[in-house]
Every structure is written in C-alpha cells, then in structure tokens.
Image (cartoon, rainbow, N blue to C red):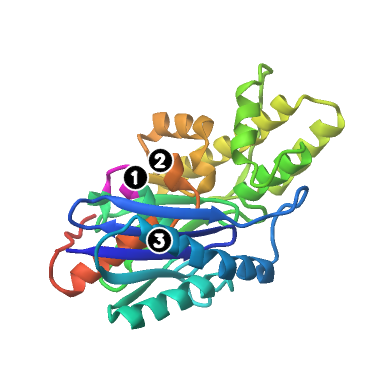
Amino acid sequence: MGFFLGIDTSNYTTSAAIYNSDSGKMLRKKQLLPVKDGECGLRQSDAVFHHVRQLPDIIDELMQSFDGSITAVGASSRPRDVEGSYMPCFTVGHGTARILADMLHVPLYTFSHQSGHIAAALYSAEKTELIGQRFLAFHVSGGTTEAVIVGYDDETVFTAELVAKTLDLNAGQLVDRTGVMLGLPFPSGMQLEKLALGNTEKLNPRISLKGFDCCLSGVQNICEKAHRDGRSPEYISALCLAYIEKTLTAMCDRLLEHYGNMPVVFAGGVMSNSIIRRSLSGRYGAFFAQPEFSSDNACGTALLCSIKHRLKNNEIIIRKGE
C-alpha cells in the first residue's frame, strides 16, 4: 500500500497525479499547453518546450496538497505499447520521473499513454475489476482513434491487440478542425458540443467502413461544404458529432459480432462528449471515463504504477479471465 505518483506529458496536456492505494483517492493537477488562436495544434518541439516550463509548477502545486511519502513513480513514456511507438513530448515526463525516483530512492515504472487512458476510464467508472479480464476498449482522441482488445500481462498490466483504427483523420482532429473553422478556441470539444445541443435540424450521416477501420477526412470535407453553404454553426457541430457517433457505433457492432460479446470501454478526450456517450452507453452498456478523466491526465498512470508495484511485491493478485 502507499502513495503512487504518475506523470503524463502528452501532446496538449501537462499532468501529474498521486494515487492513494489505501483510500482509492486521487490527487491530480493538469494544465493545457498554450495554442495560438486560429491554430489546430502544436509542433512537437513547441510541446516539449511548454512541458519543460509547466511540469515543475504542476508537481509543485500537487505536492502542496500532499502529506506523505511517495512509494513509487510512474510515467507515460510512449504513445502505445507497440515497437517503435515514440513521441518527443513524453520524454519530458519520463525524464522528470527518472530524476524524482532516483532522488526519492523509489522504483520507477513506465507505461504507454494509451494504457493510462484505459486505466483512467476504469478508475473513474469504478470498474477496475476488469483489470485482468478481456474487454474491448476504444481510445478516441486528437492523436488516436483506435479499438483494442485488452488483456493482461504481468509486465505492462495491459496488453492491447489493435483491431480497428482510423485510416486518415483522428476523431479529435475532426472535432478541433471543425471548431476552429467555426471560430471556436482550440481544443474545441466543449464548445462544439454546446453548439450541437442547440441544433434543431434533421441529421442524416451516411458513414462507411473499410473492414473494421474508418475514414474521417471525408467528414471534414462535408462540414467545410456545409460552412460554405451558410449552414448554421449548430447544425455543422451536430453533423460533425453525429458522424463520429455513427462511425464508432458501426465499428463496435462489427467488432463485437466478429470477436464475440465482451465489456466495452470508451476512453480519450472525444469520449467526454455527452451526445456520443449517451448513444453508446445506451446501446452497449459501455463504460466511460467521467469527463474530467477523459481528456489527457496522469491518473491512469498513477493507478497503473500502484498495480505494478503491488504485483512485484506480491501485495495483490490479478485474477485473469476471459
């Protein structure tokens, strides 16, 4: 048992969290990276620079709310658990975690950013009993639109078999590009949802898949055409989200039919959208991260750090299942 520090420096968020394995409580701090008005993202070099500036303040703020001793440190060191998965921004959090672990004389454990998202979803949905079981997880964000079948491994905690993906644009990119086109700030998810909830026009999205995979770049073209045609921001926002919801539904239907029925978990920033959540939750009884745990955060990394440390010290046993 103890306190476990998690650090995540993703493409758009600096975050740190401390998980108390006795109480199950989570302390957390995060800060978005600054993006100039009218722009849809950051270069990796700029993201690294902002993380270097922001992470010390994030950790300082976190420690001001903490009274205890850190048992182990965890960090996101890579986007996904596949060979060659790399993104420069994660080196900031990983490097800082190495320094802290050395100074505190505690173990360091590393995980993928994707695993952190899945763990955060299970934590906030109060479904951590799925760890060790087989389930289908969608990771839907600005950097990733994938479905993986999650299993268990003593080393990484999660295994992730990629079974579906976008072939071009990620869902979060579609949301942000549509939002910026409409004059919304980046990231645009919350503002786009507010506009979409005000739409009164009929929507008829016609999606298509290639096997289990999707293509979303055509939806951007459709939204841009609607904008040129003078359609309302409310309609365009609702249309964008309707295409994403219908696409995820079609992917999930095909995957469950092919691989068999299993629990379904949705993680990632796009999954904080109430319109999409309501539809998918009702259809599959799916589990979602609460909105504050959907976007990039270090909470899942802190939880995984706790699990990995307690496994190594034989403090817990994961019951594997199908």
The answer to whether residue 301 is left or right of residue 146 is left
The answer to whether residue 62 is left or right of residue 105 is right
Q: Can you say whether 315 is above or below 120 in the image?
A: below
Outermost residue to the front = 64
Magenta stretch in the rendered image: 122-127
Amino acid found under the numbered disc labelled 3: Ser
Tell me whether the residue at label 1 lies in contact with that at label 2, contact meaning CB atoms closer than 8 angstroms.
Answer: yes
- Of 23 and 300, the residue lying toward us: 23
The answer to whether residue 165 is left or right of residue 106 is right
Which type of secondary structure does the marked residue at label 1 adopt?
helix
Measuring 31% from the left and 49% from the top, which residue is drawn there? 123
Measuring 52% from the left and 70% from the top, which residue is drawn there? 90
- Of 131 and 20, the residue lying toward us: 20
Q: Which numbered disc covers residue 124?
A: 1
Question: In the rendering, at what x and y percent does residue 77 appear?
Answer: 46, 72
Which type of secondary structure does the marked residue at label 2 adopt?
loop
Residue that label 2 marks:
290
Badge 3 crowding class, 10 Å Cα cut-off, few under 14, some 14 to 19, many 20 or more, is many
Amino acid found under the numbered disc labelled 2: Gln
Residue that label 3 marks:
115
Image quadrant where one finds the C terminus: bottom left
Between marks 2 and 3 in the image, the one whose residue lies nearer the viewer:
2
- Of 299 and 139, the residue lying toward us: 299
